[in-house]
Each structure stands twice: as C-alpha cells, then as structure tokens.
C-alpha cells in the first residue's frame, strides 16, 4: 500500500511541476518542500486564524472553503475547489493567519 501511495505522490508532484513551469534542476531544489497527504472526507485542513505555513494543491476530490459569520456555527461557503486548484496561498504571500476554514 505504501509503495502505491509513493508512486501516486511522485506522479502528482510531476503533474504539479507542469502547472508551475519549472525545469528539472529547479524541481530538485523544491522537491523537499512537497509533501503528499491523503485526507479523508470531512477532515479540516486548517481553521480561520490558524498559522499559515503551507498551501495545498487539490490532486483529486473537492475542498470547501468557508468563513465564520456572526452566527457562530453557521459559516458561509465561499467556494468549492476541485482537482487542479491551489488553496491557502494568500496568507503565505502576506504572512497573515488563515482567513478562511
């Protein structure tokens, strides 16, 4: 199972590098910064206000982004992102906390 997971991660990282247009030498430098993670349905990647230390690339499936409202426990859905989407990048750019869950 782990071997299959590693092959899948290698494939995904290769696909990701096509999207961001880097050459093989640049890719080798960045490789240590890529981590594959399989997340089950319903798992929260981060919450509004959390420290921002990574962005995510949706390799498959969908991710819902939401924001708390004045009515606690009733967040508003801002978007649903699917395969090929980058999420969580804004806080990396300005070094702020997570703006959304």
Image: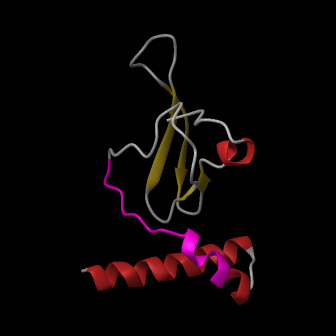
In the depicted view, which residue is nearer to us: 56 or 76? 56
Name above or below for residue 43 compared with residue 49. below
Residue at position x 47%, y 35% from top? 47
Residue at position x 49%, y 65% from top? 59
- In the image, residue 9 lies at what x, y percent? 45, 77
Q: Was residue 36 drawn as part of the magenta stretch in this picture?
A: yes
In the depicted view, which residue is nearer to us: 72 or 96? 96
Region in magenta: 28-41
- In the image, residue 72 lies at what x, y percent? 42, 14
Residue farthest along the bottom direction in this orientation: 24
Name above or below for residue 79 compared with residue 13. above
- In the image, residue 33 lies at what x, y percent? 57, 69
The colour style of the image is secondary structure
Image position of 100 (left or right of 8): right
Location of residue 44 by image quarter: top left
Residue at position x 44%, y 68% from top? 36
Residue at position x 58%, y 44% from top? 52
Counting every numbered tag in the picture gives 0
Q: Was residue 72 drawn as part of the magenta stretch in this picture?
A: no
Residue farthest along the left direction in this orientation: 1
**Which quadrant of the rendered structure holds the N terminus?**
bottom left
Location of residue 85 by image quarter: bottom right
In the depicted view, which residue is nearer to us: 60 or 92? 92
Image position of 86 (left or right of 9): right
């Amino acid at each position: 199972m782990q071997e299959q997971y590693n092959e899948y991660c290698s494939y995904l990282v290769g696909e990701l590098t096509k999207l961001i247009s880097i050459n093989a030498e640049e890719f080798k430098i960045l490789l240590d910064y890529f981590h594959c993670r399989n997340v089950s349905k319903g798992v929260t990647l981060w919450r509004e206000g959390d420290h921002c230390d990574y962005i995510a690339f949706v390799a498959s499936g969908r991710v819902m982004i939401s924001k708390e409202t004045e009515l606690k426990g009733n967040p508003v859905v801002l978007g649903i992102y699917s395969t090929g989407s980058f999420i969580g990048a804004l806080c990396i750019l300005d070094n702020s906390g997570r703006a959304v869950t």
